[in-house]
Image (cartoon, rainbow, N blue to C red):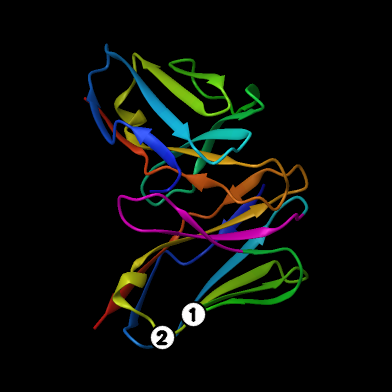
Amino acid sequence: ETGVTQTPRHLVMGMTNKKSLKCEQHLGHNAMYWYKQSAKKPLELMFVYSLEERVENNSVPSRFSPECPNSSHLFLHLHTLQPEDSALYLCASSRNGENSPLHFGNGTRLTVT
Amino acid sequence: GQNIDQPTEMTATEGAIVQINCTYQTSGFNGLFWYQQHAGEAPTFLSYNVLDGLEEKGRFSSFLSRSKGYSYLLLKELQMKDSASYLCAVRDSNYQLIWGAGTKLIIKP
């Protein structure tokens, strides 16, 4: 139990499907993140929410749409994805503060067919 | 550009010591993190260095030299469960985390 829970663990979707990834944190943190992890590549930051407001969007394609309804929940809505979007999507949370480490969920392994 | 370099893969023997290096070129420095990630699992926080020197936590130690843009993670008395990927990340002057691609550590009996 990491304190950050992601569902589903695995997802296979076609390019025309719409799906959502869910993340929930039970640590009382006030910042939440979506990262993309591809094999042998550094973690890619996609979105950051601090106090439920989006503070960063690293030029992510519009087929990825985040939602943060409150400080404990984060969603990533997916539509018309491409095969190159297949990756592990990690959610993380942290307290605000420069030395605060990120706490990650176990990720959703996404395969786009 | 900003860059973090770490070896792609290392192999070590159970009971031995291994040192995983990380060199960085970033716009400013506000701390360096090491994370451990077992296959199919979440990265978990291991250590944080912001000042030069060695931080020890049980079997794991992390060293930082800001003047050299260099850190290492030292793992002692290796156990099979230490087989994992080890990720180095640096906070730059904008407090953005810059990540390395990770080092896959394989422990052999």
What kind of residue is marked 1?
Arg
**Residue B68 image offset from top left, x and y in percent:** 73, 71
**Residue B105 image offset from top left, x and y in percent:** 37, 69
Q: Residues within 10 Å of mark 1 (few under 14, many from 20)?
A: few
Magenta stretch holds residue B39: yes
Does residue A25 appear to the left or right of A83 in the view shown? Answer: right
Give whichever of A67, A86 is nearer the camera.
A67
Magenta stretch holds residue A37: no
Q: Say above or below: B8 vs B93.
A: below
Which residue is depicted at the point 37% across and 25% down?
Answer: A21
**Residue B62 image offset from top left, x and y in percent:** 60, 73
Q: Quadrant of residue B21?
A: bottom right
What numbered label is drawn on residue B59? 1
Give whichever of A7, B10 is nearer the camera.
A7
Please say if the residues under marks 1 and 2 sit with CB atoms less than 8 Å apart: yes
Q: Residues within 10 Å of mark 2 (few under 14, many from 20)?
A: few
Chain under numbered label 1? B
First-in-chain label (1 vs 2) = 1
Which residue is depicted at the point 27% across and 13% down?
Answer: A17
What numbered label is drawn on residue B77? 2
Q: Say above or below: A76 vs B8.
A: above
